[in-house]
Amino acid sequence: MTEYELGSGQMKVMRILWNMRKATAQDIIDEMNREEPTKRSTVQTFLRALVKKGLVDYEIDDRTFIYYPIVEEKDVAHHAFQHFVEHVFEGSMEGFVSFFVRNNYVPPEKIEKIHRMLDKKDD
């Protein structure tokens, strides 16, 4: 069973793998070090957890592990969104949308664009 619950570090590793398609631990470390120093042991811990959760797999070339994602980004995003709405808004999509509109997270000029998207969805 795939487990989609991800911490921020695991999500960073997943984003790198989605972008690179395949990567060694060193490739991931190098990419993460562009933002902030990251230890090899930290990345290896993330990778082991992601493999265990069923999100990442690997192949071995000589003695080098090459990791690749086995779930799509949209699937992880979908699960995270559903979990958020369920947890924060008791599963109410209306509550979610209402919250964003009432608190001006959606500027008025964007609301019309959203209306048009929803109208097209019905077609």
Image: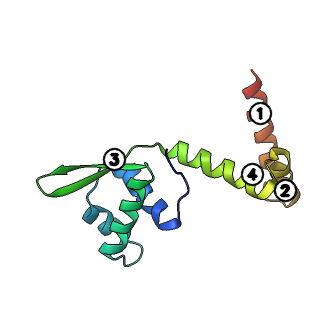
Q: CA distance from mark 3 to mark 2?
A: 36 Å
Q: Does the CB distance between marks 3 and 4 fall below 8 Å?
A: no
Q: Residue furthest left?
A: 62
Relative horizontal placement of residue 52, taking residue 25 as reference (left or right): right
**x, y percent for residue 108:** 84, 51
The residue labelled by disc 2 is 99
Task: Name the residue at 43% across, 49% down.
Answer: 55
Q: Does the CB distance between marks 4 and 1 fall below 8 Å?
A: no
Nearer to us in this view, 6 or 93 = 6
Q: CA distance from mark 3 to mark 4?
A: 31 Å
Quadrant of the frame with the C terminus: top right
Q: CA distance from mark 4 to mark 1?
A: 22 Å
The residue labelled by disc 4 is 86
The residue labelled by disc 3 is 21
Type of the residue with mark 4: Glu
Relative horizontal placement of residue 118, taking residue 59 as reference (left or right): right
Type of the residue with mark 3: Arg
Nearer to us in this view, 92 or 52 = 52
Residue 92: mark: none
Q: CA distance from mark 1 to mark 2?
A: 18 Å
Crowd rating for badge 2 (residues with CA inside 10 Å; few <14, some 14–19, many 20+) = some
The residue labelled by disc 1 is 118
